[in-house]
Amino acid sequence: MGFAQDNGYTPVSFEEIMSFVREGVNTQFGTAFTVETFVGTNWYKYAYQIVQRVQQGEIKTSEIFQKLQLYIQSTNERIQRPSVSHPGLIEAFESNGYVVSVKPPLEADAGKIFICALLDNAAIDYDDDKLAVCTLIKDFVAAGVVSMGSEVETIILSNGQSFDFKFNLPVETPILLRLTATKSRNHIVAVPTDEELRQTVFDNVNARYRLGWDFEPERYFEISDALWANDVTLEWSDDAGANWHPEVSELLYTDLYTFGLEDISVVFT
């Protein structure tokens, strides 16, 4: 039985096994049968059924090795599944099309996990998404860890037991963004239009900020994003512009700042 990295173990063919028999007869009895002359001999007739049975055993053994390989692969995947406190858990959800955040572990939360999923409970397909997220929690969170949250789905396991799997929805806060920039006299680079700058801010924040992260304005628009400026400041407001804040906003894992392109303004000084 041969082995290949891609295909695993492959059974020996009927012809190969019969060749072994022919070579054994030639060696033992001093004959010189070829493949063609061996067919039809009494030796061939006698060995025919035995070779068939041996070849069937080869096939069964090959199937066993294939199943063993699948078992080992499945076991390795379970071993490598992300733990409840590892960033891999977030990546596992993202690979299935869902954005989530996880509450940082605290001693008081031992044995529990708090997950927030970026879903809209008013969407038509929310029930399907809720079931999908809870199924992922079942699949990726270690056994014995209880999921917590306001959204609940009861799922029956393979052994017939049913468990509740839970998660939270985001607490969305609409904000305004204001970019203040001072033009540099040392650069002749063309200054983008107001619309282009607003679009850049919009794209940068969406690329660098996500559910559950602290809101860090200085990361979203830096001087390197504006070669034509000698100073830039990005600020946020959660009270319709009454107060503006350039500093970091520390957020909970369920918090999500939301904004649209129309919520961004640009000021030149």
Image (cartoon, rainbow, N blue to C red):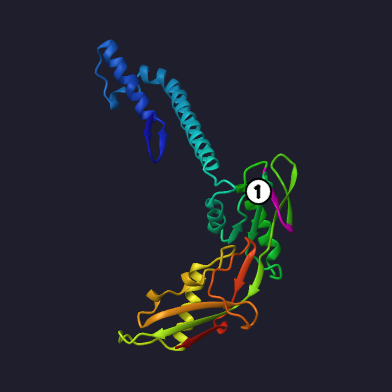
Q: Which picture quadrant has residue 34?
A: top left
Horizontal side, residue 128 vs residue 191: left or right? right
Q: Would you place residue 185 above or below residue 43 in this image?
A: below
One can see residue 245 in this view: yes
Q: Nearer the viewer, residue 2 or 128?
A: 128
Q: Nearer the viewer, residue 78 or 100?
A: 100
For residue 135, side relative to residue 186 (left or right):
right
- In the image: residue 32, left or right of residue 177: left
Residue under numbered circle 1: 138
Q: Nearer the viewer, residue 230 or 166?
A: 230
The extreme top residue here reads 29
Amino acid type, mark 1: Lys
| Whether residue 213 is situated above or below residue 65 in the rendered picture | below
**SS label for mark 1:** helix
x then y, percent, for residue 151: 73, 59
Above/below status of 109 relative to 175: above
Q: Quadrant of the C terminus?
A: bottom left
Q: Position of residue 183 (x, y in %)?
A: 38, 86
Quadrant assignment, res 229: bottom left
Q: Residues within 10 Å of mark 1 (few under 14, many from 20)?
A: many
Q: Residue at x 75, y 45 (%)?
A: 162
- Nearer to the camera, 228 or 85: 228
What span is colored magenta in the figure?
145-151
Viewer can see residue 39? no
Give me the residue at 67% from left, 44% from top: 111
Quadrant including the N terminus: top left
Residue at the image point whose x is 53% and y is 55% from the top: 91
Is 123 situated left or right of 52 in this image?
right
Residue 183 colored in magenta in the image = no
Residue 197 horizontal/vertical position (percent): 45, 83
* Residue 29 horizontal/vertical position (percent): 28, 11
